């Protein structure tokens, strides 16, 4: 375990050094972050800007903003931690450089999941946390609520990671997977609104088929203390089940891997 | 382009912002007193947003991404030896993709229409008018995205500029809501840009909420923008080539 922590620290140092080489990119990354938050805020403010609208799906403006905050935070988590790694899996399978990863004396899944970071998108994380803090400042938030939200957001991150890993692992059979992750991004866009803002059939799909509801709506509910106990317990269960499933899927994929060379 | 059939369908489905907004607005209208917001009942929201989805699918442009790659990797060089401006090669591949896209696009549109209860206009002239505006809009978008892609000659962040411009396009084009829902100052500002006429206006035509006169006026504004972006693209292209030659030689 300690060895893995040390490795994670070495990986962090290496990517940081590599990224500081391209300082001009930082401007671009900030622009992109502002674009993301702009889209998220515009959608919600036009919705609440209509005469007579004070609630969307039973959520007040500040509460819905909390969901937007979690959405931005998750966008950040994806761009900083998840996507830079996962997008390389397909590349490594296609070129055969996955050989080197599998030969190393550490867990291959750990290696492909932690090797790269995109620190340039860290502003997304800050924007997300800022939005959450701003939205929460006008709501009654209790300490148990914060703790529950922390725990549920941790399972949310696990869920997002598992979905991405699962989608990227298909690269072992289908060489191109970039498109499939685009598809997830499309569905994930629905997470910028509370799940109750959608018609009932869609709500069910966002909860059970693609568990987007657990990623942003559930932690926000925990923070405002409107979460029911069964849902609070379901989220970590879904995360655990997905983690085991993707782990098995990953091992299966690695077992069927035949190198691209010779 | 027919080689990439599966990918074309996935690209189409990943442009879901209109569909997400459609679902949210439909639920909002259904919950509102009187069952409508600003005169839009759920079915009318469905019609409007499916129309924007359809039009935005016709306006998809990825040329900036390709130019960024070609300039950075140097694959632009062999293209420069040809007697034709590379612009036309990109343009042709976009048009070809549109032809592949149209069949699954109409199939999905039919499916979504049945599921959401949308109903499009019965006036026949609205369809060629909307298509014409979409074609002009595609031209405008292609040219400004091309210009943005050329920024790769100078900066590494051309892709980020593209993201920000996409935000302006989506916002002023009316992808979040019909433009009349926006604050008034945004509406007044947007009439000077090409965006409402390339996305929102053709969508309103298909929904039966815009007149032929409005379409004509929109077309005129876009022609001016088309000319402006054509000139701008030419200038940036020539300046960029000088810079590129200096590095490559």
Image: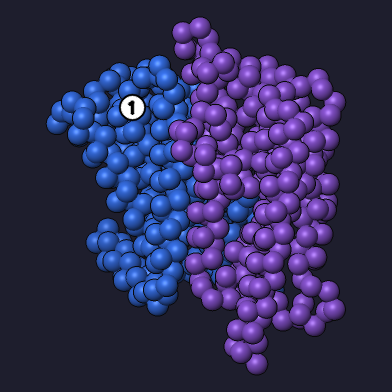
Left or right, residue B148 beside residue A100 = right
Badge 1: chain ID: A
**Picture residue at 55% right of the left edge, 43% below the top:** B190
**Other residues around mark 1 within 10 Å, as few (<14) / some (14–19) / many (≥20):** some
Q: Is mark 1 on a helix, strand or loop?
A: helix
Given residues A205 and A56, the one toward you in this image is A56
Residue A74 or residue A131, whichever sits in front: A131
Horizontal and vertical percent for residue B64? 63, 62
Quadrant where the C terminus of chain A sits is bottom right
Q: In this view, does A38 lie to the left or right of B80?
A: left
Q: Nearer the viewer, residue A173 or A215?
A: A215
- The residue under label 1 is A61
Q: Where is residue B242 in the image (x, y as percent from the top left)?
A: 64, 84
Out of B204 and B44, give the one closest to the viewer.
B204
Vertical placement of residue B136 versus A229, above or below: below
Label the blue chain with its letter: A
Picture residue at 44% right of the left edge, 69% below the top: A25
Note whether residue B5 is visible.
no
In the figure, residue A137 lies in which quadrant?
Answer: top left
Q: Residue furthest bottom?
A: B249
Q: In which quarter of the image is the N terminus of chain A?
A: bottom left
Residue for point 62% across, 40% down: B196
Relative to A176, is A54 on the left or the right?
left
Residue drawn at 25 percent across, 30 percent down: A223
Confirm whether residue B77 shows in the render: yes
- Counting from the top left corner in percent of width and height, residue A174 is at 67, 53
What color was chain B assigned in the picture? purple
- B138 versus A9 height, above or below: above
| Coloration mode | by chain
Query: Residue A153 in the image: x percent, y percent?
Result: 31, 38
């Amino acid at each position: 375990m300690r060895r893995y922590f040390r490795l994670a620290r070495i990986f962090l140092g290496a990517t940081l050094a590599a990224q500081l080489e391209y300082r001009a990119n930082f401007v671009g990354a900030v622009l992109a972050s502002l674009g993301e938050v702009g889209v998220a805020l515009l959608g919600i403010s036009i919705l609440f800007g209509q005469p007579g609208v004070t609630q969307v799906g039973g959520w007040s403006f500040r509460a819905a903003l909390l969901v937007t905050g979690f959405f931005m935070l998750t966008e950040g988590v994806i761009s900083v931690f998840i996507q830079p790694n996962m997008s390389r899996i397909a590349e490594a399978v296609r070129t055969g450089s996955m050989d080197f990863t599998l030969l190393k004396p550490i867990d291959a899944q750990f290696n492909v999941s932690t090797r790269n970071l995109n620190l340039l998108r860290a502003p997304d994380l800050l924007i997300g946390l800022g939005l959450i803090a701003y939205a929460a400042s006008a709501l009654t938030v209790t300490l148990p609520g914060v703790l529950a939200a922390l725990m549920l957001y941790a399972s949310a991150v696990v869920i997002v990671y598992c979905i991405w890993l699962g989608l990227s692992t298909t690269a072992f059979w289908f060489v191109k997977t970039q498109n499939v992750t685009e598809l997830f991004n499309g569905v994930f866009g629905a997470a910028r609104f509370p799940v109750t803002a959608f018609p009932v059939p869609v709500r069910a799909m966002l909860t059970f088929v693609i568990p987007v509801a657990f990623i942003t709506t559930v932690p926000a509910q925990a923070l405002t203390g409107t979460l029911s106990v069964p849902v609070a317990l379901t989220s970590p269960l879904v995360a655990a089940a997905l983690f085991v499933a993707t782990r098995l899927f990953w091992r299966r994929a690695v077992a069927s891997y035949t190198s691209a060379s010779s | 382009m027919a080689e990439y059939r599966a990918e074309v369908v996935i690209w189409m489905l990943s442009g879901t912002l209109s569909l997400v907004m459609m679902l949210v607005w439909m639920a909002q209208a259904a919950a509102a007193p009187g069952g409508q917001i600003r005169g839009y009942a759920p079915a009318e929201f469905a019609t409007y947003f499916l129309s924007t989805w359809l039009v935005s699918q016709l306006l998809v442009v990825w040329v900036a991404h390709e130019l960024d790659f070609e300039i950075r990797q140097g694959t632009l060089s062999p293209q420069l030896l040809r007697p034709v401006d590379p612009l036309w090669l990109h343009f042709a591949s976009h048009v070809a993709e549109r032809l592949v896209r149209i069949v699954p696009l109409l199939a999905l549109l039919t499916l979504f229409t049945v599921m959401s209860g949308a109903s499009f206009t019965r006036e026949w002239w609205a369809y060629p008018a909307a298509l014409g505006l979409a074609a002009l809009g595609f031209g405008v978008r292609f040219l400004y995205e091309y210009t943005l892609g050329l920024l790769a000659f100078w900066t590494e962040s051309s892709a980020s500029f593209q993201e920000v411009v996409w935000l302006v396009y989506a916002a002023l084009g009316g992808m979040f809501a019909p433009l009349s829902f926006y604050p008034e100052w945004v509406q007044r500002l947007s009439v000077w840009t090409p965006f409402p006429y390339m996305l929102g206006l053709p969508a309103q035509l298909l929904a039966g909420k815009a007149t032929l006169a409005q379409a004509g006026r929109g077309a005129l504004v876009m022609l001016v923008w088309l000319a402006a972006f054509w000139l701008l693209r030419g200038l940036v292209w020539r300046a960029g080539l000088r810079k590129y030659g200096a590095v490559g030689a």
